[in-house]
Image: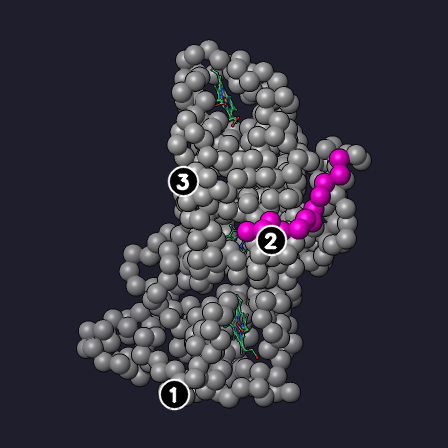
Amino acid sequence: MRNPLTLAAVLAALCGSAALADGTVAPGDVKYEDGAVAVSLTGTPGDPANGPAVIDRKGGNCIACHQISAVNLPFPGEIGPPLDGAGSRWTEAELRGIVANAKMMFPDSMMPSFYKTEGYIRPGVAYTSKPPEGPLDPLLSAQQIEDVVAFLMTLKD
Amino acid sequence: MKRLHMALLAALVSASPVLADEEAELVINGDLHIVTRAPAAPHLEGHLDEVISGWVFRSDETQALQMDDFDNPGMVFVDRAMEVWNTVDGSEGKSCASCHNDPAESMKGIRAVYPKWVESAKEVRGIPAQVNDCRENRMGAKPWKYEGNEMAEMEALITLQSRGMTVDVAIDGPAQSTWERGKEIYYTRYGQLELSCANCHENNFGNMIRADHLSQGQINGFPAYRLKNTKLNTVHDRFKGCVRDTRGVPFKPGGAEFTALELYVASRGNGLMIEGPSVRN
């Protein structure tokens, strides 16, 4: 997986700063307050048009667990609640927190933590069954998270 | 997820993920009545009330394939294993039959109590470890690969001799510490997706995860013939796939961790009946 964060993460590690070179907040530096994240992870507004791609299998595979009427994907899962109306139930900051690391909002949630790179037990490189040789990329990039949050905000009751 | 994707493709081809008739009864060859739902063993208190065979969660078509041995694609492999059973192999000039005679008698009931503590080896073993012990130390033959076809097929032949018998693995005595280790593995959230067996198979059985209808992940039906790869699959094969799908690194098939997990998962099926070789998608 080509991830623009990797280089930025290396740069950030080198200069030891919280914000990445391009202004992106690194996974370890995200500030959660009651499960919510007030500050944009990128400083660039999310593009809701990219939301459906993040929801699909090749993105965060949200569809494996959630039904979302606004995206036309077959066989949605039923592990989590349908996301219809999520933009009315939650604020943008709450949705950012839920997508970045749902366990901050819902302790022990089955939902994967999409913006995290550490603390795993026997992590592999995607579905290869092989252990990683270097640091892992988060499941979604900061921009993908901003995009899917912007999309979720359009899902009103 | 790769497997979810495959299942999705398969489902698209067949127009929709067809759900099983959850009230259906499993009767094999018209006369062997299989218990597919049973009260959960006492050690599952607070976790499950009822244990349910994976057969219940499959589509009508897949269910039907397991109801008649002429339709069950796993049966040809059992026939093949019967030939191997009778074939001399290794430096000692022996076949399985030389010592164990007719498997219908010598292997009856074995699968229902395995994995179990083997006193002579001072460890908990699954059937494959016993088979390889006989091959290496009693026949002077090469051990089979744990997930290889020969092993899966021989295990199916041995399993068939217990079909319809109630799963009853021991979890106490010398097996207890291995069982505890298996339980710990079952509830550990592995991989970058941080998912435990329990997340999917205890808390979400009956729910769809994308196009897959989640079962309790029972192993009373193993070895299982899978329509997906058209061969018999061992228990550890399945465990491996499930851990891989957490974006994790599986344990070694045939190794101590998966054997402990197998004992624990088998004990979650105490009360169900041995069904192998079963048919799954």
Q: Chain of mark 3?
A: B
Position of residue B122 relative to residue B100, above or below, is: below
Residue drawn at x 72%, y 57% is B19
Residue underneath mark 2: B216
x then y, percent, for residue B29: 77, 34
Neighbour class for label 3 at 10 Å: few (<14), some, many (≥20)? few
Of circles 1 and 2, the one toward us is 2
Q: Which of B271 and B101 lies nearest the eye of the viewer?
A: B271
Alpha-carbon span between mark 2 and mark 3: 23 Å
Look at 33% across and 72% down and name the residue there: A5
Q: Position of residue B266 (x, y in %)?
A: 55, 44
Chain letter for mark 2:
B
Pointer 1 local density, CA inside 10 Å: few below 14, some 14–19, many at least 20: some
The answer to whether B45 appears left or right of B89 in the picture is right
Q: Is residue A59 left or right of residue B123?
A: right
Residue A8 rendering spot, x and y as whole percentages: 28, 74
The residue segment tinted magenta is B32-43
What chain does mark 1 sit on?
Answer: A
The extreme left residue here reads A15
Residue B2 seen in this snapshot: no
Q: What is the three-letter code of the residue carrying label 3?
A: Gly
- The residue under the point 52% across, 58% down is B198
The residue carrying mark 3 is B255
Q: What is the three-letter code of the residue carrying label 1?
A: Val
Mark 1 to mark 2 CA distance (whole Å): 41 Å
Dot 2 lies on which element? loop
Counting from the top left corner in percent of width and height, residue A10 is at 25, 71
In this picture, is B146 found above or below A152?
above
